[in-house]
Amino acid sequence: MWVRCVVASVVAVVVGCSLLPLDVERLQASVGGFAVLNCHLDFPFGNEIPYHLQWDKDGETIFSWYSSDSAPRLADRWGGRVTRLGDGRLGLGRGSINVSAVRETDAGLYRCRVTFPNRTPPARNNGTFYFLDVDGSNLIVTPPMNSTVLEGERAEFECMPKNLETIVQWYKDGTPIGAIPELATRAELVENGSLVIRRAESTDPGEYECHVQDTDGQVQSASAFLDVQYKAKVVYAPKERYLLHGRPASLDCHFSANPPLTNLRWEKDGFLFDPYNVQGVFYSRNGSLLFNVVIIIML
């Protein structure tokens, strides 16, 4: 039943036992899924000025970002799950956010607020209300969320079922964890359904998916991605290489790095060798040196 009421000149709607703003938009999400909350910015006279973007849920701030800051401030349980979609693509406003790895407790009233700290008055007609409904018929209470760790560190993905008697199985890129020998020896399934990788390796990045099955045979799954960062390492580089005079050739130095390598240096006889200063010598994308023609320089 919908009932309109006016309190202190604010028009609202009573839904069940909750009081919601009349202009609230309802969104639907499933546990483990995502929800995009759109928020357009309205600058005075159409010119961008310093601003503060804030998202509240049920009256509590979960996201706060000043346009002069590089990173936002997030409430504790929202870390790694809320990202700002500020590039204006897909027709979304620059104050929009994406909530990933949705949980049942994420259901509620969200509000976008934009203020201008260097302007009087500091507020305009900015702000959007959303009410997020989370499918409550799910088997998973807490889904896994994306994780980034350093090589050798511990990695953990949550997948807490509503009923601890249900069966929880984990997969990596569609393959059961137990069928991946180099991973199975380092992985452990704990009692609450979580997956723990004791020592992450550079081969572990990928999509990890948990399947939860109840006694009636109903199955629900949720997934997240693991990223493992590690220092640059050479994966292939022959110690000796014989090149034919007058012919094209290459000196191989294949490497792997995460994050991607930004600087590569070759040395010749203990001194820096810069191919950009040598005609006919080039870098390849994998780090190798390419020679148009091998020549002999007599000193």
Image: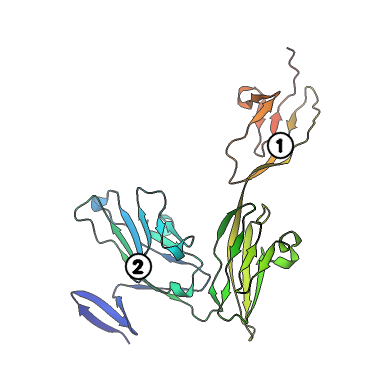
Residue 165 image point, x, y percent = 62, 82
Q: Amino acid at mark 1?
A: Cys
Where, by quadrant of the figure, is residue 238 drawn?
Answer: top right
Q: Nearer the viewer, mark 1 or mark 2?
A: 2
Q: Which residue is mark 2?
A: 60
Earlier-in-chain disc, 1 versus 2: 2
Where, by quadrant of the figure, is residue 144 drawn?
Answer: bottom right
Query: Residue at the spot x=42%, y=74% of the render?
Result: 107
Mark 2 neighbour class, 10 Å CA radius: few under 14, some 14 to 19, many 20 or more? few
Query: Residue at the spot x=62%, y=58% of the render?
Result: 154
Task: Give left or right: position of 74 versus 184.
Answer: left
Q: CA distance from mark 1 to mark 2?
A: 53 Å
Residue 253 disc label = 1
Residue 164 image point, x, y percent = 60, 80
Compared with residue 141, is residue 54 higher up or lower down, i.e. above or below?
Answer: above
Q: Is residue 160 visible?
A: yes
Q: Amino acid at mark 2?
A: Glu
Residue 202 image point, x, y percent = 66, 52
Query: Residue at the spot x=76%, y=62% of the render?
Result: 181
Task: Give left or right: position of 289 versus 59.
Answer: right
Where, by quadrant of the figure, is residue 237 drawn?
Answer: top right
Residue 75 image point, x, y percent = 41, 62
Q: Are marks 1 and 2 in contact (CB under 8 Å)?
A: no
* Helix, strand or loop status at disc 2: strand
Name the residue nearer the viewer: 45 or 16: 16
Residue 16 disc label = none
